[in-house]
Amino acid sequence: MRYRLRDHLSACVIGEHAVFLDADADRYFRLSGALERAFLAYATDPLAAPASLLLEHGILVPAGPESADTPERMDLPLRSALEMPHDPPGCGIAAIPEVLATLWACRHALRARGFASVLEWTAEHRTRRCRLCIPEPSQEQALLHATRLFLSARPHIPVATCCLPDSLALTRFLARRGLHSRIVIGVTGDPFSAHCWVQAGDLALNETVGHAGAHTVIRVV
């Protein structure tokens, strides 16, 4: 029988340890002892590893016929919009009302809805607005221009920057223009930290290549 991680649970392996993100509970955690050994065996060979302990603790569930074999993954970025030369797009004054409203909506949703629900809300909005799931090369200039417009307006918003609401807002700002992007959530192991950024193909939009590359991807939205 085939198995998969239960809904809203994602994981990655950093060195000799597995790290989990439970979006339902809005928390990261690690397993210990026999549970971690069982999961590392499963991550190495899902078909050969005994899964009973992981099933018993709700880490894995049986995979139905429609289940994907593996969760969606994305490679770390090779380029960054922040590190590419460009002409200044101006101060972004015209975009300030939209950026403010979008950022406020995302921050409010995180407080009111919960993490997993907000991720689904964002993905559904992108699906409605974007014709393409993978950005075409011809869209890159439009992606860069819209991203720079957002980032140029962002300093005029009197709210401290925070990677999650800012990345949610940028994703929705781009989707409104028919531009598809992904939110990539990454973690580090020692010391533990979590971070996210917006990415389209191999291009990070609101993060540098070096900072993104210091993380291991645990979830792509």
Image (cartoon, rainbow, N blue to C red):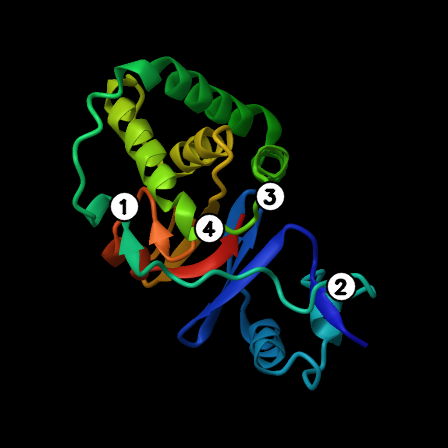
Q: Residues within 10 Å of mark 2 (few under 14, many from 20)?
A: some
Q: Position of residue 190 (x, y in %)?
A: 32, 63
Q: Which residue is mark 2?
A: 61
Whichever of labels 3 and 4 marks the residue nearer the N terminus, that label is 3
Q: Marks 2 and 4, Cα distance to the nearest angstrom?
A: 36 Å
Locate residue 25, reporting x and y percent. 60, 43
**CB contact under 8 Å: marks 1 and 4:** no
Q: Can residue 20 be seen?
A: yes
Up-down relation of residue 193 to residue 5 (above or below): above
Q: Give the number of the mark in front: 2 or 4.
A: 4
Find the distance from the CA under tag 3 to the CA under tag 4.
35 Å
Nearest the viewer among 219 and 153 is 153
Residue marked by disc 4: 136
Q: Which mark is residue 128?
A: none
The residue to which callout 3 is attached is 25
> What percent of the width, then of the height, locates residue 143?
38, 40
Q: How many angstroms separate mark 1 from mark 4 (CA)? A: 16 Å
Tell me the kind of residue under disc 2. Answer: Val
Q: Which quarter of the figure has residue 151?
A: top left
Asked if labels 4 and 3 touch by Cβ distance under 8 angstroms, the answer is no
Q: Is residue 57 above or below residue 219?
A: below
In the displayed structure, does residue 42 sit left or right of residue 66?
A: left
